[in-house]
Amino acid sequence: MAEFTIGTEQDNDVRDGAPSRSDSRELDPGVLAQLTALRSLVDRAVGTHDLDQAAGSRLAAVVDSANAEALAPTPRVERIEADLVDAKGIAAGAPTVVAVIEGVVMTLTG
């Protein structure tokens, strides 16, 4: 009978919250600039009423979260991607914002 075990390194990563190997890939330097531009675009979209105030506030918070993760000493790319997926859903009514979010995702995922 064959024995199956869980790799201790992977098991420890899940247990202690340390980033896994797939999470720790290097972040493209252009992502930070794109996230900063996206945040400015969100503010402009609220100002021009392309996004209502509530959606703009939620979207700004999600973009700020992605930016904070990108600035972390060991950024988790999957966390940034998840934030951008959330951002895209919030910005669904503003095609220009959605296009910029998709551009950031393209840069992030290579």
Image: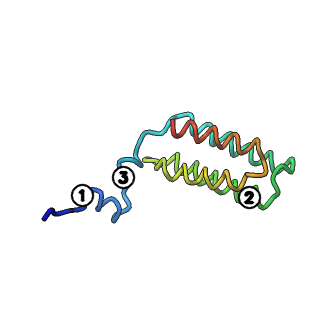
Q: Which residue is mark 1?
A: 7
| Label 3: how many Cα within 10 Å (few below 14, some 14–19, many 20+) | some
What is the distance, in whole Å, between disc 2 and disc 3 at their CAs?
31 Å
Residue drawn at (58%, 50%) of the image: 66
Residue drawn at (29%, 62%) of the image: 11
Foreground residue among 92 and 100: 92
Earlier-in-chain disc, 1 versus 2? 1
61 lies left or right of 28: right
Kind of residue indicated by mark 1: Gly
Which residue ends up furthest to the front in the rendered image? 1
Helix, strand or loop at disc 1? loop
Which residue ends up furthest to the left in the rendered image? 1
Which numbered tag is attached to residue 20?
A: 3
Earlier-in-chain disc, 2 versus 3? 3
Residue drawn at (36%, 57%) of the image: 18
Q: Which residue is mark 2?
A: 57
Residue drawn at (68%, 55%) of the image: 89
